Structure formats: C-alpha cells, structure tokens
Image (cartoon, rainbow, N blue to C red):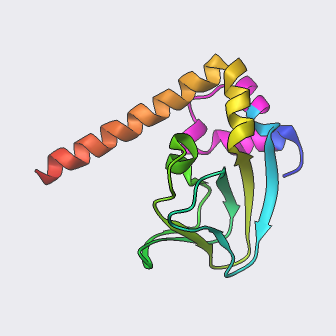
C-alpha cells in the first residue's frame, strides 16, 4: 500500500474514519507510515503511554488485559484508539500472532493535522458519539 490513493481507499473501510471525506483522508494518509511486525512481536503493553495508533492491514493481533485474551483481530481495524486520543495508559497489550502489516499514525503528527482540519475532527466526533451510543445501549441491556 504505497500510494496515497491506495491508503485513502483502505482508510475509508475503517470504522473510525467512515464519516471522513476522501479529501480529508488524503491528508490523513499523508502522515501514515507502513509498519510490519513479526509473529510474537508486541505492538504495545498494558500501562504504556500511547504514542501511536496502529491500523491493521492484514495479520493476526491478540489484545490482552491482565494477561488474558480479550479479543483476536484478523480484519482491518484501528488498534489503540482510546489511549491515542486521551493520552492515558494503554488498557490492553497488543501482540502479533503472525506476521502482520499496519499503517501507523503518530499522535503528534495527527494532532498537528487536526489543528488545520476541522472536517476531520467532525468525522471523528461522529465515530465517538456512535461508540458511546453503543456502549449506552449495552449498559441499558445489562441493567
């Protein structure tokens, strides 16, 4: 995935970015970096400070909390989103179970981009509101 166009098309399929225009995604694609990890390689550990977000292109990543498997990721998805945005410690560890390929977004580069791109911020707000609504619905179902 070398060209900006390829990255934009890919990013359009990621839930986090689905409400962001192609034009804004082109700017975002411009700050992404390709990254490959070997089987057994850790992306980040629970308790680490977040410096980047990983977007799985292909591979297999296990998310663990307190050493227990919480989720296995095999489809394209953004990983490490919450810590990326709030700057707090990672809630889980992420380890590759096979060779995996990612686009990586650096937190500082991302916030520099947001300063000039209001439309990008609006699309991200839509995503977070959707997530909060889902969590609210789930918590109401539990009560």
Front residue (pair 109, 120): 109
The residue sitting at the left extreme is 143
Is residue 133 toward the left or the right of residue 80 in the image? left
Q: Is residue 125 located in the magenta-colored stretch of the structure? A: no
Is residue 118 toward the left or the right of residue 63 in the image? right
Front residue (pair 95, 22): 95
Residue occupying image coordinates x 73% and y 52%: 104
Total of numbered circles in the picture?
0
Give x and y (percent) for residue 55: 66, 53
| Quadrant assignment, res 3 | top right
What secondary structure do most residues of the magenta stretch adopt? helix
Q: Is residue 20 located in the magenta-colored stretch of the structure? A: yes
The residue sitting at the right extreme is 2
Give x and y (percent) for residue 134: 32, 42
Is residue 85 toward the left or the right of residue 108 in the image? left
Give x and y (percent) for residue 136: 25, 41
Residue occupying image coordinates x 54% and y 43%: 15
- Tell me: residue 112, above or below residue 41: above
- Tell me: residue 54, above or below residue 111: below
Give x and y (percent) for residue 70: 42, 70
The residue sitting at the bottom extreme is 40
- The magenta stretch is 7-27
- Tell me: residue 130, above or below residue 72: above
Is residue 96 toward the left or the right of residue 4 in the image? left
Residue occupying image coordinates x 50% and y 55%: 89
């Amino acid at each position: 995935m070398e060209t900006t166009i390829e990255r934009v098309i890919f990013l359009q399929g990621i839930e986090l970015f689905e409400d962001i225009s192609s034009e804004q995604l082109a700017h975002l694609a411009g700050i992404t970096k390709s990254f490959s990890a070997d089987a057994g390689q850790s992306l980040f550990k629970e308790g680490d400070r977040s410096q980047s977000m990983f977007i799985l292109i292909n591979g297999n990543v296990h998310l663990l909390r307190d050493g227990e498997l919480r989720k296995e990721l095999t489809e394209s998805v953004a990983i490490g989103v919450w810590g990326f945005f709030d700057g707090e410690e990672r809630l889980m560890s992420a380890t590759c179970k096979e060779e995996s390929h990612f686009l990586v977004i650096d937190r500082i580069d991302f916030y520099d981009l947001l300063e000039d791109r209001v439309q990008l911020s609006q699309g991200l707000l839509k995503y977070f509101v959707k997530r909060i609504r889902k969590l609210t619905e789930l918590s109401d179902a539990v009560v």
